[in-house]
Amino acid sequence: MASREKRVVFITGAARGLGRSLALALHRTGRYRLALTARGEAFETSSRDSILRGPDVHWVSLDVTNPAERDSAIDQVAELWGGVDILVNNAGTMVRAVVEHLTDSDHQQQFAVNYRAPLELARLVLPGMRARGRGHIVNISSVGGMMAMPTMGAYSASKFALEGASEALYYEVRPWNVYVTLVAPGFINSEGFAHVSYTSRSREASAHASSPYHAHYEYMADFIAKTMQRVPSTSESVAARVVRLLERKRPPLRLSGTFDAALFAMMRRLLPRGLYRCLPGVRRWGPH
């Protein structure tokens, strides 16, 4: 078993976006050992990464929804470095659909990745953290976990669930000096909007102007794409905030990942009904 002078950080979804930016930022400090996960083709590509390599980096093939792979991944890290000191549940997925266009399988997939997987991984690392008397679980949430947006109901539901369970866990493990933090980014300047998935019905409605919900998809997709391309926050700037978070002796339960996340939280408290009038193209929604 290797020396534990450096804290071991386990990051899911490390192949791209925030996960990769966080891995790079932590790797540059030289103060951490990194267990980085990806699945399928992303794992094959990332495990050959010329930057994220070395004795302090270990790539793990992991589908976070697969129980056997979760067990194996945590066991690998325990055998290699003695266990996980910091768990960063970053992997996530989003299906874009109004509630009427969601099926049971759509709900199951959203919750399997965004809710169940983070809690199952937390359950696997907690015995070691309690035994060592220290640890930190960081769950990457979203402003969608404190306020919902049209066409993102299942995504928001999964993040609301993650927030509730994480808050309960925060209180449960404090006696062992184990902390839980919810990091809630808002809009990040990236191509992330291109990676959302659609249900068969939401894809059809998005493509056909005759659909009752066509305007919902048209205006929301355009609004989100344009906003993500204009905001100053990047995956690197959010990663820098997370690095600072990991250095804190008493990390908080909640951390805004971007400047607009704090703004959204304030709007949610002050103007819950007024938000409807601010939705893009809302006067074109519904019957004309």
Image (spheres, rainbow, N blue to C red):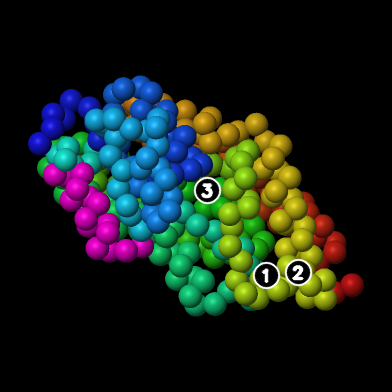
Q: In the picture shown, does residue 151 fall above or below 274?
A: below
Residue 91 position within the rendered picture, expressed as x and y whole percent measured from the top left: 43, 51
Residues shaded magenta: 65-79
- Label 3: few (<14), some or many (≥20) within 10 Å? many
Q: Is residue 288 left or right of residue 244?
A: right
Q: Which corner quadrant of the image does residue 98 belong to?
A: bottom right
The question of residue 185 being in magenta is answered with no
Depth-wise, is mark 3 or mark 2 nearer the camera?
2
Q: Element under label 1?
A: helix
Q: Which corner quadrant of the image does residue 48 belong to?
A: top left
Task: Give the residue pinned by disc 3.
Answer: 142
Task: Give the residue pinned by disc 2.
Answer: 207
Comparing 103 with 2, the one in front is 2
* Marks 3/2: CA–CA distance: 27 Å
The amino acid type of the residue labelled 2 equals: Ala
Q: In the picture shown, does residue 252 fall above or below 31?
A: below
- Which residue occupies 56% across, 48% down? 143
The amino acid type of the residue labelled 3 equals: Ser
Q: Are marks 2 and 1 in contact (CB under 8 Å)?
A: yes
Comparing 23 with 267, the one in front is 23
Q: Is residue 258 left or right of residue 161?
A: right
Indicate which disc residue 203 carries. 1
Query: Can I make out residue 165 in this image?
Result: no
